[in-house]
Image (cartoon, grey):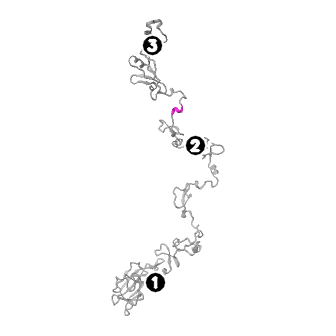
Amino acid sequence: MAITVNTLVSGYNLDPEFAGYASKLMQAIQRAIPESTFGMILVDTVTPDISGAFSWRTRCLWIDTNEANPLPVLKAYKASTGWFAVANAISNSTITTAMIQAGAVTLAKLYAPGAGEANKLIRVNAGGGGFELVTVASIIASIGNIPITSLNNTAVGATAELFVGCIGNTAGEVYWRDANDIAGLMGNAAVAPSKVGPATVLTTKTKFLSSRTGDTYGVYRVLDPDTDVDDGTLNGDKLLDGSVVGGKLSNLSVSGAKIEDATINVTTKLVVPATSALKVLGVNSAGTAWEMQSTAALFTSRQYATAAGSQAAFAIGSATLVTYAHGLTVGGVATTPTQIRWVLIPLAGIAGWAAGEEVPISCFGLNSAEGGIFDNGANTTNVYLGYRAPSFATVNRVRTKGVPDTFVDMTGTTWKIKAYASL
């Protein structure tokens, strides 16, 4: 309701005593207002009227009892802003600790935490200028460690090396334990293989935990036979029967004593390769590796004086000598071949022979009046073939595959010469 005109309520009826003057006396009393340095307390649900004769109300305190407010609000008037709550007259950050009653501020008055801040603690921030809510783990992480004295403050000797441990006799007991105590708890083979960490870098080869001269701790390594196995400690019994191939045998000569002392059983330890029937173990032509060789190749065509496809052209003309360096040696010494075989190779089919077939020079000759035309020989360096021009120029007689003697063309564009030589 609006504040009434009268500031006071009549406490006594003056009409019997003062007749016609009573109402004027009551107005003088009821409508009296405070002088300029005084005020009153106004109580109303609406803003007080301060216009005209009611301007004096600006010196009053107004208790606003509007039902919209949870509690009555004490207000004052200021010409520049109008009516304002007295509580707002207290500036931010002006209430001092001394103004707060000791023990009066509860945790609920400090902060209303949210669901995401469960189990957090209040901590001074890194800058030291405020507080923050953090987890216990982050507190430990920022410190870097928990002082051991916070776990157990029992004094430890200056030279002692002890570890914190618990014994289950009583819950919560913490003790200093030495290395012997820990070893005693482990017992024999107490560490399960699954508890031993693997090598940092794994490979397809098995790595073993080991230590060598100069190591200060255990190191994972693959087994190195040159380092980890002593010379002369492996014997033939450790080899799988039939597992040693020729390429694994050294191309070195050994004395008889070494052969007698050998521990490898050749008949059971050397592997027999496939398709090696009637072959023998020998060194290849380059002298660099072992290989299985035909016994026939050792004696008849062990090496060729020329490579296939690079034979010399056969030409009819005056007496000619064809020479090839055979390169055959025994023990590194150049040696004269024991067998030599010369052939002619037709470049196209002729007289029953197909292109590329090899025809021994013994098949060729002049007519019956002339006789043979070829001769050959060898020394420690070369094999050679001599031939002479037939009197019939480009015609020779050849004994072919079941065909009677035939005259054939022997020009250089038709035939080539090839030689085989062996020791």
Specify whether 72 is left or right of 412: right
Three-letter amino acid code of the residue under disc 3: Gln
Residue 219 found in image quarter? bottom right
Name the residue that disc number 3 marks: 30
**Tag 1, which secondary structure?**
strand
- Residue in the image at 50% along x and 77% along y: 293
Three-letter amino acid code of the residue under disc 1: Gln
Q: Position of residue 242 (x, y in %)?
A: 56, 72
Q: Position of residue 239 (x, y in %)?
A: 58, 69
Q: Which residues are magenta?
A: 106-110
Name the residue that disc number 2 marks: 148
Circle 2 Cα neighbour tier, 10 Å, few/some/many (<14 / 14–19 / ≥20):
few
Tell me the chief SS of the magenta region: helix
**Tag 3, which secondary structure?**
helix
Circle nearer the N terminus (3, 1) = 3
Name the residue that disc number 1 marks: 339
- Residue in the image at 52% along x and 58% along y: 202
Q: Position of residue 400 (x, y in %)?
A: 41, 87
Q: CA distance from mark 2 to mark 1?
A: 93 Å
Label at residue 202: none
Circle nearer the N terminus (3, 2) = 3
Asked if the residues shown at circle 3 and circle 2 are in contact, with their CB atoms under 8 angstroms apart, the answer is no
Residue 206 found in image quarter? bottom right
Does any portion of residue 374 appear in the rendered image?
yes
Circle nearer the N terminus (2, 1) = 2
